[in-house]
Amino acid sequence: RIKAEKLCVKAVPTSYQAFMLAVENGIPITTLEENPTLDLTIDGADQIDENLNLIKGMGGALTREKIVAAASKTLIIIADERKKAKILGENGQKVPIEVLPFAAPFVIRKLSELGGKSKIREGTGKVGPVVTDNGNFIIDVDFGLIENPDALDAKLKRIPGIVETGLFVNMADIIYLGKPNSVKKLEKSKL
């Protein structure tokens, strides 16, 4: 469609897989260095609360996804209606956290002090932890129900060794929730 309609679209891939998909489909690639402000980001989410806060990062690219989302004028999330929750953390949804490998044992101890149950994410195709495109580990943390995601995110970011969290607080502008026979649109401006 980009070629057929001569759309002027450039993509900033947040992972190697996204980069390869863009190349395979003829989508021009750019960087944040070339385009530090982006018009639009379209992404998915692992969980969405009533205030449009998100848990993202089960795919492992959470740091780059958050940077690109923050660089964008508009963040649109497309997700299945089953991703909607009253409160983040429902149904055992874990929060992915990217950490420096050297700091992982220390970070796990600090997460435990905050009430989190942590597990370093293991690879499925190889033995050992998942390594992000940034060379870091992902720790999946069960905090139970997250009543105040903004406060939790701030506490987590004060722990040395944490690169970024999968809590995307007050970032989404529009969310499209897919239902069996329709789509529901949620907008931050209408909350």
Image (cartoon, rainbow, N blue to C red):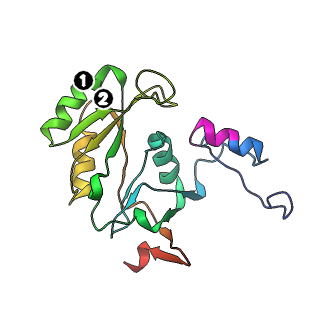
The residue that label 1 is drawn on is: 105
Residue bounds of the magenta highlight = 14-20
Residue 120's quadrant in the figure? top left
The image shows residue 154, relative to residue 15, as above or below, that is below
Provide residue 147's location: percent of width, then percent of height: 20, 60
Dominant SS of magenta comes to helix
Q: What residue type is labelled 1?
A: Pro
- The mark nearer the N terminus, 2 or 1, is 1
Quick one: SS at disc 2? loop
Quick one: SS at disc 1? helix
- The mark found on residue 153 in the picture is none
Q: Which amino acid does label 2 sit on?
A: Gly
> Between marks 2 and 1, how big is the CA–CA gap?
10 Å
Provide residue 28's location: percent of width, then percent of height: 75, 46
Quarter of the image where the C terminus is located: bottom left
Label 1 Cα crowd, 10 Å radius (few <14 / some 14-19 / many 20+): few
Q: Which of 15 and 6 is in front in this view?
A: 15
Magenta-drawn stretch contains 16 = yes
Label 2 Cα crowd, 10 Å radius (few <14 / some 14-19 / many 20+): some
Q: Is residue 29 visible in the rendered structure shown here?
A: no
- The mark found on residue 161 in the picture is 2
Provide residue 66's location: percent of width, then percent of height: 46, 48
